């Protein structure tokens, strides 16, 4: 999928692993899928970018403090035009806001929601 298609409202646009052992995940997924992995230091954490060829395909990070106790898992991001506006609709539609909107510097704004059955999903509005 090209970058513009990924930034359309409603498109799945990113995948991210939150894990208890980033080093082991890098070894496993790098060998399994042939990903090239690069760590990026942010003010809050080290974030690992996974590339296939020259295209970034996913990210990996340690489970953050506010999510301690959750099992390691992959999460999907869906692009929306305005994350703050979409979050307002979640509860009206029977879902829950798990994490209110917050900024990712130089990337955009995201929020974590769950649908009425409890399945979680991340919505994101990209800044670029």
Image (cartoon, rainbow, N blue to C red):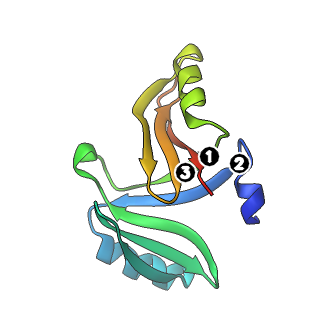
Q: Is residue 115 above or below residue 27?
A: above
State the image quarter where residue 15 is shown: bottom right
* Residue that mark 1 sits on: 78
Tell me whether the residue at label 1 lies in contact with that at label 2, contact meaning CB atoms closer than 8 angstroms: yes
Name the image quarter holding the C terminus. Answer: bottom right
Give SS at disc 2. Answer: loop
Pointer 3: residues within 10 angstroms few (<14), some, or many (20+)?
some
At x 46%, y 38%, the residue is 112
Q: CA distance from mark 2 to mark 3?
A: 10 Å
State the image quarter where residue 39 is shown: bottom left
Between marks 2 and 3 in the image, the one whose residue lies nearer the viewer = 2
Q: Is residue 25 left or right of residue 53?
A: left
Viewer-nearest residue: 109 or 10: 109
* Residue that mark 3 sits on: 76
Rendered location of residue 65, percent (x, y): 22, 49
At x 51%, y 22%, the residue is 95
Q: CA distance from mark 1 to mark 2?
A: 5 Å
Rendered location of residue 54, percent (x, y): 64, 83
* Residue that mark 2 sits on: 11
């Amino acid at each position: 999928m090209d970058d513009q298609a990924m930034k359309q409202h409603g498109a799945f646009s990113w995948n991210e692993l939150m894990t208890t052992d980033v080093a082991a995940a890098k070894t496993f997924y790098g060998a399994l899928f042939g990903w090239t992995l690069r760590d990026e230091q942010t003010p809050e954490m080290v974030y690992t970018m996974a590339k296939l060829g020259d295209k970034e395909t996913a990210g990996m990070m340690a489970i953050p403090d506010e999510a301690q106790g959750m099992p390691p898992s992959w999460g999907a991001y869906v692009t929306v035009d305005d994350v703050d506006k979409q979050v307002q609709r979640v509860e009206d539609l029977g879902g829950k806001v798990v994490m209110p909107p917050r900024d990712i510097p130089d990337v955009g704004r995201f929020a974590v929601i769950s649908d009425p059955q409890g399945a979680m999903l991340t919505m994101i509005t990209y800044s670029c």
